[in-house]
Amino acid sequence: MQFCDDCGSMMKSMGSQMVCANDDCQATVVKDEEKAAEFVSTEEQSGDEVIETEEGANFEGKPTATDVTCEECGHGEAWYTIKQTGAADEPPTRFFKCKECGYRWREYN
Ligand SMILES: [Zn+2]
Ligand SMILES: [Zn+2]
């Protein structure tokens, strides 16, 4: 049961809308279910999905590589993770994050 916001009369269901039963008013409102559906669809569209890449993974607590030089600040220590990105017979790729400036890069085979 829904009542008109304008005059307080009972609302009648008309398709996707509720229409005020008061002939002098005849206010219309979109049904709650329709609003809910709209809300869900905008929710889906709004959230720009941030997909965490291998390069963006959390490096803190990972082993430290000291045989590297940061391309960004020249620092000689970086966290690294090793991932098998290609075929099994290819060497795995090391992903680095500079301990000094946080710059991330990957080692190309
Ligand atoms: Zn009304
Ligand atoms: Zn750096």
Image: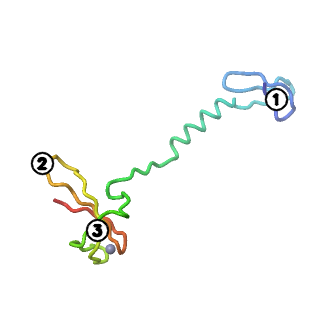
Horizontal side, residue 82 vs residue 46: left or right: left
* Residue at the far bottom in the pictured view: 74
Q: Quadrant of residue 65?
A: bottom left
**Could you tell me the amino acid type at mark 2?**
Asp
Q: Quadrant of residue 36?
A: top right
Tell me the mark number nearer the camera, choosing from 1 and 2: 2
The numbered mark at residue 89 is 2
Identify the residue at image location x=70%, y=27%.
Answer: 17
Where's residue 8, x and y in %?
86, 31
Mark 1 C-beta closer than 8 Å to ligand 1: no
Identify the residue at image location x=67%, y=22%.
Answer: 15
Where's residue 5, x and y in %?
82, 35
**Could you tell me the amino acid type at mark 1?**
Phe
Ligand 2 occupies quarter: bottom left
Q: For the N terminus, give its image quadrant.
A: top right
Horizontal side, residue 53 vs residue 49: left or right: left
Cα distance in 3D space between marks 1 and 3? 67 Å
- SS for dot 2: loop
